[in-house]
Image: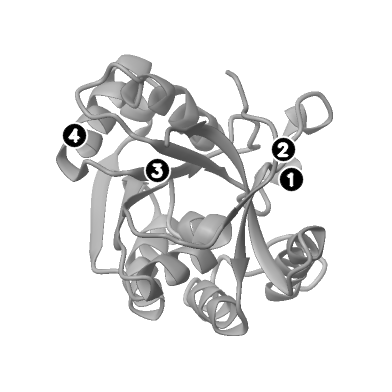
């Protein structure tokens, strides 16, 4: 995969946006502030939750997506309800993603990073790489890989092929407030202060990424594709 070099900051957003979230809370951890900013800019945002509930915890997690959706303000959520056999069968997963991409016809896709700790995140990247290929039925002009806190920073590949952001979305106080409030909807997923999935840590990451680009807050991404 070729990563485009340089730093990009996003100011003028007017697009059809597709967020691919393997599980409930990934959409908030990876790009919750950017979702709020897209909505504020009048963009059309769809979040596709990929994995089906498979136990009591994941059932609650999926139920909480509705509350987080109301906080962030996006209109469209898709629950793909795929099981492990489909997600980890690359050809089947590609077909499922192709249906979503060809139906939504997004200008921009937010997805997970290829070096994430969670195997479902890595499987999503691999399948999307084919499903959103340049010669697919629908051409996706921009693809961004999210920094999903507690997975991107914990991956085994982190020391070999780390997440190196080259695209930042600046966030205001109210974008960050929405991200934190949406994250609070996932009560069972929030951990104590020393954990990377704590409210305190997620807020600190937004501050740290902001300082990298002379902003109060930001979310950071790796730009996989950009076609002007």
Which residue is at a point 76% across and 70% down the rendered structure image?
207
On the question of residue 49 being in view, the answer is yes
Q: CA distance from mark 4 to mark 1?
A: 31 Å
Image-based side of 87 in relation to 34, left or right: left
Which residue is at a point 37% across and 29% down the rendered structure image?
87
- Residue 102, which numbered label? 4
**Crowd tier of the residue under label 3, counting other residues whose Cα lies within 10 Å: few below 14, some 14–19, many 20 or above:** many
Q: CA distance from mark 4 to mark 3?
A: 12 Å
Q: Earlier in the sequence, mark 2 or mark 4?
A: 4
Q: Which residue is mark 1?
A: 153
Query: Hey, which residue is sitting farthest front in the picture?
Result: 228
On the question of residue 51 being in view, the answer is no
Q: CA distance from mark 1 to mark 3?
A: 21 Å
Report x, y in % for residue 166.
Answer: 68, 42
Report x, y in % for residue 143.
Answer: 46, 38
Q: Earlier in the sequence, mark 3 or mark 2?
A: 3
Which residue is at a point 65% across and 31% down the rendered structure image?
115
Q: CA distance from mark 3 to mark 2?
A: 18 Å
Q: Which residue is mark 3?
A: 109
Q: Earlier in the sequence, mark 1 or mark 3?
A: 3
Compared with residue 204, is residue 116 higher up or lower down, i.e. above or below? above
Q: CA distance from mark 2 to mark 4?
A: 28 Å
Q: CA distance from mark 2 to mark 1?
A: 8 Å
Give the SS element for disc 2. loop
- Of badges 2 and 1, the one in the foreground is 2
Compared with residue 105, is residue 75 higher up or lower down, i.e. above or below? below
- Residue 163, which numbered label? 2
């Amino acid at each position: 995969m070729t990563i485009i070099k340089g730093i990009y900051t996003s100011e003028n957003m007017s697009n059809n946006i597709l967020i691919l979230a393997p599980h409930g809370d990934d959409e908030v951890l990876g790009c919750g502030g950017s979702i709020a900013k897209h909505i504020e800019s009048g963009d059309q945002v769809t979040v596709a939750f990929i994995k089906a509930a498979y136990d009591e915890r994941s059932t609650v997690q999926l139920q909480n997506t509705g509350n987080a959706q109301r906080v962030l303000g996006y209109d469209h959520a898709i629950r793909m309800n795929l099981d492990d056999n489909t997600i980890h069968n690359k050809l089947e997963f590609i077909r499922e993603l192709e249906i979503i991409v060809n139906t939504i016809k997004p200008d921009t896709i937010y997805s997970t990073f290829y070096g994430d700790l969670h195997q479902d995140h890595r499987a999503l990247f691999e399948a999307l790489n084919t499903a959103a290929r340049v010669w697919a039925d629908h051409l996706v002009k921009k693809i961004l890989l999210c920094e999903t806190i507690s997975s991107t920073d914990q991956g085994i590949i982190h020391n070999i092929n780390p997440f190196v952001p080259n695209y930042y979305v600046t966030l205001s106080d109210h974008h960050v407030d929405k991200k934190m409030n949406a994250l609070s909807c996932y009560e069972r997923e929030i951990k104590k202060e020393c954990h990377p999935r704590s409210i305190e840590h997620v807020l600190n990451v937004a501050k740290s990424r902001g300082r990298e680009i002379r902003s109060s807050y930001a979310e950071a991404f790796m730009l996989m594709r950009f076609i002007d």
